[in-house]
């Protein structure tokens, strides 16, 4: 009877408990992020079909996790390229706004100054011309502000640190917050 009991214990240990422990261990490793975890129990052994199903599931999880990682990396690269393109476009628009509109406004200021020097007598024309010059000054300031808001020249000229410092100073100047 003692031999039968020992043989029964040995058989249970070898056929049921060991494979179950191997399966639980593999499940724990998979749960903890080890996607290469496999139960490794041969199909002909007790629990082999369950272990095979687990191993197949673990292989699918591993493949899908790798695909997800590749997809995330592609998304990061796409976001980086998109941001670079947006920055290039902002730089281009800022230059166009500054150069083209700034040049046109400067020409208009010169023309209004020329006209102001040559008009004689009619105060209504003089007042209207002064209003035009004030509007030109306001518009020029707006063009500079829009151009700077799109892409601060200090960013390209002096780098990120100087641009951040300049933005902080501009914020303090506008809001009064030190």
Image (tube, rainbow, N blue to C red):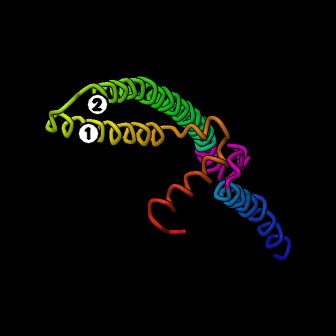
Quadrant of the rendered image containing residue 125: top left
> Is 64 placed above or below 120 here?
below
Range shown magenta: 33-58
Residue at 78 percent of width and 59 percent of height: 14
> Is 146 placed above or below 98 here?
below
Q: Which residue is mark 2?
A: 116
Of 78 and 9, which appears nearest the observer?
78
Quadrant of the rendered image containing residue 8: bottom right
In the rendered image, residue 97 lying in the magenta stretch gets the answer no
> Mark 2 and 1 residues: CB-CB less than 8 Å, in contact?
yes
Q: Is residue 5 left or right of residue 82?
A: right
Quarter of the picture containing the C terminus is: bottom right
Of 113 and 158, which appears nearest the observer?
113
Q: Tell me how far mark 2 sits from mark 1, CA to CA.
A: 8 Å
Q: Which residue is mark 1?
A: 130
List x then y, in percent, for residue 132: 25, 36
> Is 104 placed above or below 30 here?
above
């Amino acid at each position: 009877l003692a031999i039968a009991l020992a043989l029964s214990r040995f058989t249970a240990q070898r056929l049921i408990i060991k494979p179950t422990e191997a399966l639980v261990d593999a499940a724990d490793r998979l749960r903890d992020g080890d996607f290469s975890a496999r139960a490794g129990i041969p199909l002909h052994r007790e629990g082999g079909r369950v272990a095979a199903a687990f191993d197949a599931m673990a292989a699918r999880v591993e493949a899908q996790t790798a695909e997800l990682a590749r997809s995330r990396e592609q998304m990061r690269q796409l976001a980086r390229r998109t941001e670079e393109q947006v920055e290039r476009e902002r730089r281009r628009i800022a230059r166009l706004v500054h150069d083209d509109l700034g040049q046109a406004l400067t020409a208009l200021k010169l023309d209004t100054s020329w006209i102001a020097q040559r008009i004689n007598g009619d105060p209504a024309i003089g007042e209207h011309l002064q209003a035009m010059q004030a509007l030109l000054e306001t518009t020029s300031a707006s063009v500079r502000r829009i151009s700077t808001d799109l892409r601060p020249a200090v960013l390209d000229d002096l780098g990120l640190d100087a641009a951040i410092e300049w933005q902080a100073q501009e914020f303090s100047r506008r809001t009064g917050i030190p």
